[in-house]
Amino acid sequence: MNAAKPIKIIVSMIGLDGHTTGGEVVARILRDAGMEVIYLGVNQTPEMIARAAVQEDVDAIGISSHAANYSQITELMDLLARAGLRDVLVVCGGTIPRRRVEELKEKGVAEVFLPRSTSESIVRYILANVRAPRTPPR
């Protein structure tokens, strides 16, 4: 029996993005990998996600994004930093243009999983990087 505390992760869509399939599938994949998943669903504001991260004391946040709501993701990163949650790993997934990927990483998003990312690559990345020291965003 593993005595280590399981990774606790929020999975959500941000803003008015109503595409739920990707987030729901990833939530199940992470749950099956032994993580504790808090699924917030759609229409979450950056403030709601940051508040949930504080209340639930999460290790990571996964944002599914299929809309042009990148400013809300960067706003979430700012809110997390102000709340002292720089150690919370934030990953995104979805149809995100490559130029936006770099912008999000510059703001502190740890990784962006584009379409055709495998379940194994997502789980492996989270397992390897949660609770690991990170460099602050530029």
Image (tube, rainbow, N blue to C red):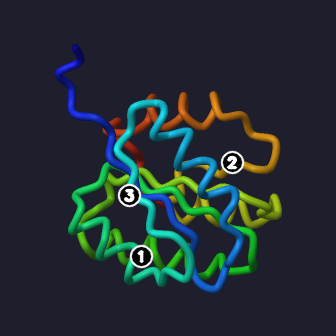
Of the two numbered discs 2 and 1 in the rendering, the one whose residue sits closer to the viewer? 2
Question: Going from the N terminus, do you reach mark 1 or mark 3 first?
Answer: 3
Question: Which of 134/70 is in front?
Answer: 70
Question: Going from the N terminus, do you reach mark 2 or mark 3 first?
Answer: 3
Q: As displayed, is residue 3 above or below residue 24?
A: above
Residue found 33% across the figure and 69% down from its top = 81
- x and y, in percent, of residue 29 in the image: 56, 39
Amino acid of disc 2: Phe
Amino acid of disc 3: Ile
Q: CA distance from mark 2 to mark 1?
A: 21 Å
Residue found 17% across the figure and 21% down from its top = 3
Which mark identifies residue 78?
1
Q: Badge 3 local density, few (<14 within 10 Å), some, or many (20+)?
A: some
Residue found 32% across the figure and 47% down from its top = 8
Q: As displayed, is residue 126 above or below residue 62?
A: above
Residue at which label 3 appears = 38
- x and y, in percent, of residue 32 in the image: 48, 33
Q: Element under label 3?
A: strand
Q: CA distance from mark 1 to mark 3?
A: 21 Å
Residue at which label 2 appears = 113
In the rendered image, which quarter is residue 122 located in?
A: top right
Q: CA distance from mark 2 to mark 3?
A: 19 Å
Question: Which of 137/32 is in front?
Answer: 32
Q: Badge 1 local density, few (<14 within 10 Å), some, or many (20+)?
A: some
